[in-house]
Image (cartoon, grey):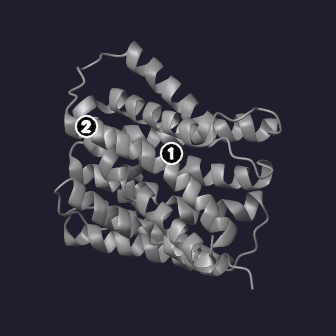
Amino acid sequence: MTPQRATLAGLLAILLWSTSVGLLRSLTEALGPVGGAAMIYSTCTLCLVLFSRFPSLRGFSKGYLFGGGLLFVCYEIFLSLSIGFAANRVKAMEMGMINYLWPSLTLLFATFINQQKSSLGLWIGVAIALVAIVWMMKGESHWLPLVMWQNILTNPLAYAAAISWSLYCNITKRLARGKSGNTLFFFAVSVVLWIQYTASSRPPMAFSLTTVLELLFMGASTAVAYSARNTGIQRGNMALLATASYFTPVFSTLLAAIWLHTVPDLAFWQGVAMITLGSLVCWWATRET
């Protein structure tokens, strides 16, 4: 494959991952927050197995398998439930944006876990990203530090998701040894969600042709995205892919707004732009010469 096609494959992965917030909300509205998430991750697991087979446990470090696996499972469950239990579609999109604190937090945690060199700009970038969340969520109230704390208490799963994925990215870099346990981890997520679904009150799942097609698309897109991402990383233009990945909040908001037929207000779009800016500032502060 040529470098140009590999780069296009990497860009396709970014685009496919950007559909996750809108699809998660649409499917959990039809199938329930827990049952919908269980169906989503079961379908994703099946598609990953069909595309790449179930991985052997040989060669995995125990730290990555258990520590990284636990963080992966927590992230996917926290994210899906925060979006599924959101009061409405705009709130679900807000949960998705809180999730996109993870690029800034990943680089922040990297300075402690992986001894990543950085400058003062890293802290400025993280501050911009946090202010963006407050700006989106404050509504008609005044900007106060207390607003951020109240928002964290109101939406703990979304913040826990961002922190979990940030830690997972650093654990993976340190312990994965070039291996990927994504298929195994997706399977674990689906098992945990089915256990939770069985143990809780279970509203009926409202299957329709649209729901089935969305499930199949999300499962297939997840498998294709992981494959395309690996191709892009190995053979594509990494500088372009790295830069494009920091604009995922913008792509995600646009696609979710189209998919969910929802138009966020101006403050929301301003917050999306600030989250993207904060991530780019963090990247600039930690980039290698």
List x then y, in percent, for residue 17: 44, 56
Q: Position of residue 133 (x, y in %)?
A: 38, 63
Q: Residues within 10 Å of mark 1 (few under 14, many from 20)?
A: some
Q: Give the numbered dot on residue 175.
A: none
Relative to 133, residue 191 above or below: above
Which picture quadrant has residue 185? top right
Question: Which SS class for mark 2?
Answer: helix
Amino acid found under the numbered disc labelled 1: Ala
Picture quadrant where residue 27 is located: top left
Residue 167 vs residue 182, the one in the foreground: 182
Query: Would residue 121 be seen by someone viewing this image from the given angle?
Result: no
Q: Is label 1 in a helix, a strand or a loop? A: helix
Mark 2 Cα-neighbour bin, 10 Å: few <14, some 14–19, many ≥20: some
Tell me the amino acid under the disc marked 2: Thr
Residue 172 is left or right of residue 214, and the answer is right
**Residue at (50, 74) in percent of width and height:** 244
Q: Mark 1 against mark 2, which lies toward the viewer?
A: 2
Q: Do we see residue 34 in this rendering?
A: yes
Residue placed under numbered mark 2 in the picture: 211
Name the residue at 26% across, 51% down.
Answer: 91
Residue 7 image offset from top left, x and y in percent: 56, 73
Task: Left or right? Give the position of 79 relative to 285.
Answer: left
Q: Which residue is mark 1?
A: 160
Expressed as whole percent of the image width and height from the top left, the position of residue 209 reads 21, 36
